Image: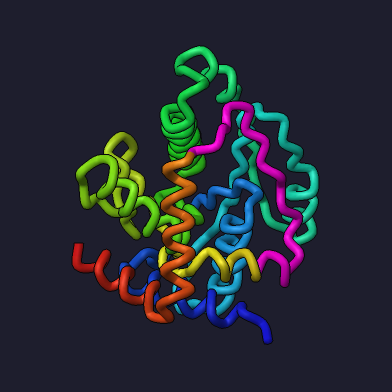
């Protein structure tokens, strides 16, 4: 049985609940080549055909200089006849110059900020008023727990927020979709996934522990995802 209806339903519910998409929106879709971003684009393309409102999509690939090959991704987009952009920026060189490459956390954080900066710039240049990112429910839960355990904060990964530096709205339509579903969906749809190749990535024991904890809790409690999702809504 296909899981597309489950993902589409969860994404559609989030989009409606948080009013992520309105008539006339021009949405930049961050396409990393991973399972989540492919699932995001696929779901948005399906909703675009059925939604009562008109909105445009512009997939954007940020080639950060880590030696990843996006050829198959671009071929996939051309097959779908979707206009897309590839932004080649030497983020890897900037990270190497500006941070301690032995500190995984700082490298990842700085790299993410640089990527967001590129997406914001492209969104402004292309007259996009929103940016869609493929963060899933596991990402949101892990972020909350990391903040609670290591930063003494209950900050959450918000479904919708406005970037202060650009005034562009960021939306996360997959915020209620467990990672296991996007992984299964990627296999089902045979997306041309890009193998991640970060030059600075080292094992992050804290992140690994949190991910293992979430996985174990989800196995033991069939209501784990819905319960934590409801708790985050209250936050």
Rendered location of residue 24, percent (x, y): 43, 62
Q: Residue at x 56, y 32 (%)?
A: 202
Q: Residue at x 58, y 23 (%)?
A: 92
Left or right of residue 145, residue 175 in this image: right
- As for residue 193 lying within the magenta part, the answer is yes
The image's colouring method is rainbow
- What segment carries the magenta color? 185-204
Indicate the quadrant where residue 13 lies.
bottom left
Q: Residue at x 45, y 18 (%)?
A: 99
Q: Residue furthest top?
A: 97
Indicate the quadrant where residue 41 lies.
bottom right
How many callouts does the rendering have?
0
Rendered location of residue 132, percent (x, y): 47, 54
The quadrant in which the C terminus is found is bottom left
Indicate the quadrant where residue 1 lies.
bottom right
Left or right of residue 140, residue 81 in this image: right
> Is 97 located above or below residue 82 in the figure?
above
């Amino acid at each position: 049985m296909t899981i597309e209806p489950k993902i589409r339903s969860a994404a559609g519910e989030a989009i409606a609940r948080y009013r992520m998409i309105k008539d006339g929106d021009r949405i930049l879709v961050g396409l990393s080549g991973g399972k989540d971003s492919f699932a995001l684009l696929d779901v948005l393309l399906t909703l675009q055909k059925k939604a009562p409102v008109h909105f445009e999509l512009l997939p954007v690939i940020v080639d950060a200089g880590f030696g990843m090959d996006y050829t198959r991704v671009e071929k996939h987009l051309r097959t779908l006849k979707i206009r897309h952009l590839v932004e080649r920026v030497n983020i890897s060189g900037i990270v190497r110059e500006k941070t301690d490459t032995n500190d995984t956390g700082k490298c990842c954080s700085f790299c993410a900020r640089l990527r967001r900066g590129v997406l914001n710039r492209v969104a402004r240049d292309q007259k996009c008023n929103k940016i869609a990112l493929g963060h899933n429910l596991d990402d949101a839960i892990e972020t909350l727990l990391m903040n609670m355990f290591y930063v003494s904060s209950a900050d959450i990964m918000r479904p919708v927020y406005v970037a202060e530096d650009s005034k562009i709205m960021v939306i996360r339509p997959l915020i209620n979709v467990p990672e296991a579903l996007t992984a299964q969906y990627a296999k089902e749809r045979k997306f041309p996934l890009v193998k991640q190749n970060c030059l600075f990535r080292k094992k992050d024991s804290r992140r690994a522990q949190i991910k293992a904890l979430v996985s174990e809790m989800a196995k033991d409690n069939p209501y784990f995802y819905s319960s934590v999702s409801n708790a985050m809504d209250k936050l």
